[in-house]
Image (cartoon, coloured by chain):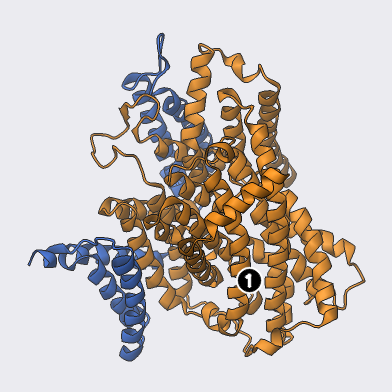
Amino acid sequence: MLRKLNWRCIIFIATAILGVIWVVLGFGTYGFWSAEEGPGAGFFPAIIGCVLVFFSVIECIRSFGRYEVKFDKDALFVVGSVAFILILNFIVGLLLALLAYYIVWLKCVEKYPWKKVILITLFYGAIMYGIFSLWLQVPFPTGLLGLI
Amino acid sequence: MLETFSLLGHGFAVAFSLQNLGAALFGGILGLIVGAMPGIGSLAGCALLLPLTFHFDPTTAIIMLGAIYYANMFGGAFSAILINIPGDAPAIMTALDGFSMTKKGQPGKALFISNYSSFIGGFIGMVILVFLGPALASFGLNFGPSEMTVLMLVAMTSISWLVGENPIAGIIATCLGMMISTLGIDIVSGQIRYNFGSIWLLGGINFVPLVIGFIGMTQLFDLVIQDRKKEKISYVDVKIKFRDTLLTKDEYKRATRPSITAGLIGTFIGFLPGAGATAASFLCYAVEKKISDGKTLVPLGQGAIEGLAASESANNAAAAGAFGPLLALGIPGSGTTAVLLGGLMMWGLNPGPMLFTTNPDFAWGLIASLFISNILSLAISLGCIPWLQKIVRVPIGVMIPSILVICFIGSYSTSNSMFGVVIMIIGGFLGYIFNKCSLPVSPLLLAFVLSSTLETNLRRAFLTSNGDLTVFLARPITDVFLVIFLIMILVPMGRAIYSKIKKN
């Protein structure tokens, strides 16, 4: 039975659970309807939750044992990239983390020669810094480096 | 009529300030470059460039957004013509004749015809928009909460359940979009809801990081997988010079007639909620095939100027026409216009029947900026032709870190907080899983954008009628919308059941 449970089923089970949470909170905590004020804050979410539960259950049953969802291993490169930037952001700040990511990606993954890596990083880095930091004055986080 | 011209003139006066022109030019150049890059397309292009507009005043921001959108539509054709990879869905038909012309050594002419026809189609669409947009809005002024409720439901069905083979998956995505929009403060009562004790969720979810995650970062997954598999793109090595782009008198003639025909049909299709630029491009190509059957120098699909002109004119006309229902009724006809609508709403600009009366500066400024964007996009595109080969050939290995960097900076800069980045990352991973499980993402974003209008009007309708459900049947307009709504749900479902029976 569990073998027939594919990713698509899991997604619809998750959406059904979300729907139940929305219905329960909508009816119970936020108020569905009051005689004086009419529909409450939970009115709309509870209805949406009901519709979501209904269709998620149908789709889950339909998907059971029928679909095979395969995730590509290469998608882990994106996960790794995001983790690399987030960790480095805490230490050197967002802009430097992004520059370091450019270098690591181009050198280690794409295997570009150093000259090309530095030229591309400087070119794109200058554009990003010029537009967002200098022109639009976005106050980027500076990480632990900023505290020194 | 005179009033329309005077309002449009006022719109031009707004759009013609130095700052607004500069913003339109900058947006046009960026939109064109991003739209031209294969694998990005107009939807992701608009989503990624949206944060750039935040630091301007609302009018300038909207003008820049209009320019980005319109230039993206121009740019989508370039990769289709030069490397046979359509930048977005409407450019699929462009690739048929455009790439054939490139293979025959006429890439310059193909690019020129694409720009020329896009300009004509866009211009026709905008002229019609000037007259039909306000008319549609004054019709919409008769709408009360019950009509608006049913209209929003129709709007959600317009792209939600027509896309994809599985209407139920579309409904689920729509519900998820609506649920995400309920996080934070209830706009009617001011009550805090569904924040699960988190202060970050008090203000709800910001649209821009969400759209960057679901569209931009999901695109990144595809690019990385494509890059790691070392899928090679076949290039036709040709150098393009300015003089190669010039058309003869006969070629102008062969491009002009299909551009005008497709411009008119495309605008009409653009006005229909849900039809969009892709449908316009496919339909006009089919119409052109009928009209010019046996009359063209080469058959359509093998490098015919007529086919290229029809496809390009139609998709730009539809892109302009789509502004009619978007501005007058608040109905976006495609994923890209849904992103645009989300962007407009971020400045407190609520497209709908009241827009032309309460915010004429915005509405007419935006329409005028579309005219300017059309001219600017044409000028930039023609000027860029010799360098377009380089733009469309940016290696995927360089595009990947660039897109991820834009995703991070864009989602951070909307709120100057890492919470935006977190939303973007969650949206990106969910988008990837949705993609793998064949769950459409566009309905989720559209529902997220329209949900607050739907909820407010639904609650108002029930409040004024003391909870009487017949309020949605009492007026002829609601009846008509309800019938359309039911058709839009039942037809795809019936189609799915029919094809299943046929398969069995």
State which quadrant residue B168 falls in: top right
* Residue A129 horizontal side relative to residue B168, left or right: left
A127 shown above or below B179: below
Q: Residue B439, percent across and down?
A: 52, 48
- The quadrant in which the C terminus of chain B is found is top right
Q: With A48 as the anchor, is A127 left or right in this view?
A: left
Could you say whether the residue bearing mark 1 is in a helix, strand or loop?
helix
Badge 1: chain ID? B
Q: Quadrant of residue B184?
A: top left
**Position of A37 relative to B83 (above/below):** above
Image quarter in which the N terminus of chain B is found: top right
> Chain coloured orange: which letter?
B
Q: Position of residue B138 (x, y in %)?
A: 66, 34
Q: Going 36% across and 86% down the picture, which residue do you hit?
A: A112
At 54% across and 70% down in the image, what residue appears? Answer: B32
| Picture residue at 65% right of the left edge, 54% below the top | B320
* Vertical position of residue B247 compared to residue B423: above or below: below
Give the amino acid type for the residue marked by disc 1 in the picture: Leu
User: Residue A129 or A55: which is nearer the viewer?
Assistant: A129
Is residue B275 in view? no
Residue B504, placed above or below residue B433 = above
**Which sits in the foreground, A61 or B110?**
B110
* Residue projecting furthest to the right: B294
Number of disc labels: 1
Mark 1, residue position: B378
The quadrant in which residue B301 appears is bottom right
Which colour represents chain A? blue
The answer, for residue B63, to whether it is visible in the render is yes
